[in-house]
Amino acid sequence: MPLTDQAKIQIVQERVFIKKVCRNCGALNSIRATKCRRCHSTNLRPKKKELPTKRA
């Protein structure tokens, strides 16, 4: 069921997309993180902001 309410979409985007991903181990970290919580690497990237598309 797709979301149509803009307020709910904004909440979901904040919860899901505003994170950083470790390039070494793939762990999700907070957006303010400077080091990975799992492997302590500083090689972090922001999470991609696109929803995955369904494949048939």
Image (spheres, rainbow, N blue to C red):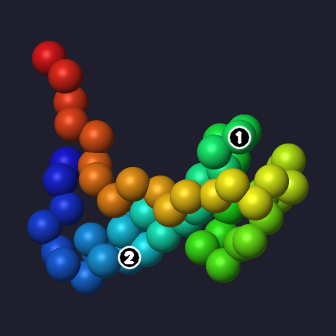
- Residue 24's label in the rendered image is 1
For the residue marked with disc 2, what is the amino acid?
Answer: Ile
- Give the residue furthest to the front: 43
The answer to which of 17 and 2 lies nearer the viewer is 17
Sort mark 2 into few (<14), some (14-19) or many (20+) by Cα contacts within 10 Å: few
Q: For the residue labelled by badge 2, is the local secondary structure a helix, a strand or a loop?
A: helix
Q: For the residue labelled by badge 1, is the local secondary structure a helix, a strand or a loop?
A: loop
Q: Is residue 25 above or below residue 33?
A: above
The residue singled out by tag 2 in the image is: 11
Image mark count? 2
Q: Is residue 18 above or below residue 47?
A: below
The answer to which of 8 and 19 lies nearer the viewer is 19
Left/right of residue 32 with respect to residue 18 in the rendered view: right
Q: Is residue 23 above or below residue 31?
A: above
Q: CA distance from mark 2 to mark 1?
A: 29 Å
Left/right of residue 10 with respect to residue 33 in the rendered view: left
| Residue plotted at (26% across, 82% down) | 7
Image coords of residue 38 (percent x, y): 84, 50
For the residue marked with disc 1, what is the amino acid?
Answer: Asn
Image coords of residue 11 (percent x, y): 38, 76
Image coords of residue 49 (percent x, y): 34, 59
Q: Is residue 4 visible?
A: yes
For the C terminus, the image quarter is top left
| Residue plotted at (85% across, 47% down) | 39
Q: Earlier in the sequence, mark 2 or mark 1?
A: 2
